[in-house]
Amino acid sequence: MNVLPTAPLRELAHQVGFDLVGFARAEPIPPESLLSWVAAGYAADMDWMGERAAERLDVSILLPGARTVISFANNYWRDDAASVDSPIARYARGRDYHSTLRDRMKAFRKTLSLRYPELGTYGGVDSGPMMEKVWAARAGLGYVGKNGCFITESHGSWVLLATLILDAEVDDYGAGPAADRCGACRRCLMSCPTGALVGNGRVDARACLSYQTIENRERQVPEAFRVKFDNLVFGCDICQEVCPLNRRPVFADHARFEPRAVAALGAVELAALTPEQYQELIPGTALARARYDGLRRNAAYALGVAKQASARGVLEKLSGDASELVRTAALWALSQLEP
C-alpha cells in the first residue's frame, strides 16, 4: 500500500469530533518504564497491566505489519454551574467518554476503510492493551507530566485519548514528545493528599484516590486513604486543579461532555441512592465502573470525612444495608461524626 497523506487524515479526525491528532511510527516501546512500574507494585491489583505487557510494548502483536499509530485527543473540561462542587471527577460527569470517543473512532475508521479498502487497523479507547500516553507523546500531542497525566499545550491535561494502529505508513510523523513544561514546579506532588505521585510521571495506584474510588470496589479502603475523601466520591482531580498549565482551560463545547443529572448530586444524595435511582442516573456514565455498592461506600466515607451531622440519618440507614461493604463504611462514617 502507498504511503498515506496525513493532511486529509487530520481533516477527517477534526470532522468526526477529535480536537487533536498526531502520528507516530509503530516502533516497539522500551520495556523498562512499564515493567519497573509493575514490579514496584504500583499497579495495585490491576493485573491486566502486566499480563499483556508484550502487546502493550509492541503493537505489531496487536496488528501484524503495523507501521503507524494515530493518537487522538479530546478536551473535556467544563465549568457548568450545576456541578461546580460535584464530588465526581470532571471526566465522569457527562456521558461515558469511552462511548463518545469510540463513536468518533468508528466514524473515522468507516471513512478510512472506504478510502483504503485494503488498510488494516486496530483501535481502542482506554481499554485495549495500548500505552496511549506513550503514543500520544510520540505523535507530538504533548508529554506526560509529573502527575502522570498527559499534558497538551492547547488543553492542558483535561484530555481523553484514543489510539488507532495502521498497517501502512504516512507522509508526516510527529517530532516526538513536546518539551517538558513542568520545570521545577512540584505543586501536584505536594498537593496529592495520599502521596501517590512518586516522581518521573509515575503514580502508585495503591495510594491514588482515583484507583481507590473506582477500581477498588469490592473491599474497604484503608483508613489512611479514606480519611482523604474530602468531597470525593468518584475519581480525583486535585493534581490537575493545582497544575499551573491548567490555569486557562478551554471549555469543551460538546454536548456529550455536558454534565448529566448525577453530577449535581452531593455525597448525601449519592449515599442515599436507591437501586431504582441508580438505574436511572448511572448507566451510560463512567460511574458505572464503581458499581452500586462501591459508589455508596465512597459517599459514606466522604460524609464521615466531612463530619456532616445532617447525614446521620442516611448513614444510620446504610449501617443496616444488605451490603457488608456499605454497612462497614457507614459505621465508620458514623464514628467520625460529633456525638
Image: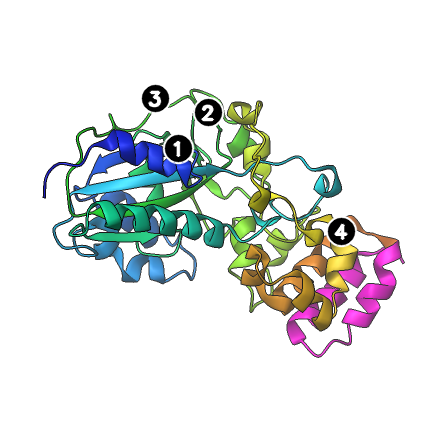
Q: Which residue is mark 4?
A: 266
Q: Which residue is mark 1?
A: 20
Q: Amino acid at mark 2?
A: Ser
Looking at the image, tell me whether mark 4 or mark 2 is earlier in sequence order. Answer: 2
Q: Amino acid at mark 4?
A: Gly
The spot of residue 298 in percent (x, y) is 66, 59
Instruction: Give the position of the C terminus as an image quadrant.
Output: bottom right
> Mark 3 against mark 1, which lies toward the viewer?
1
Looking at the image, tell me whether mark 3 or mark 2 is earlier in sequence order. Answer: 2
Q: Is residue 122 visible?
A: yes
Question: Gap in Å between the C-alphas at discs 4 and 2?
Answer: 31 Å
Q: Are discs 1 and 2 less than 8 Å apart at CB?
A: yes
Looking at the image, tell me whether mark 3 or mark 1 is earlier in sequence order. Answer: 1
Query: Callout 2: few (<14), some (14-19), or many (20+) C-alpha neighbours within 10 Å?
Result: some
The residue sitting at 50% across, 44% down in the picture is 196
Query: Callout 1: few (<14), some (14-19), or many (20+) C-alpha neighbours within 10 Å?
Result: many
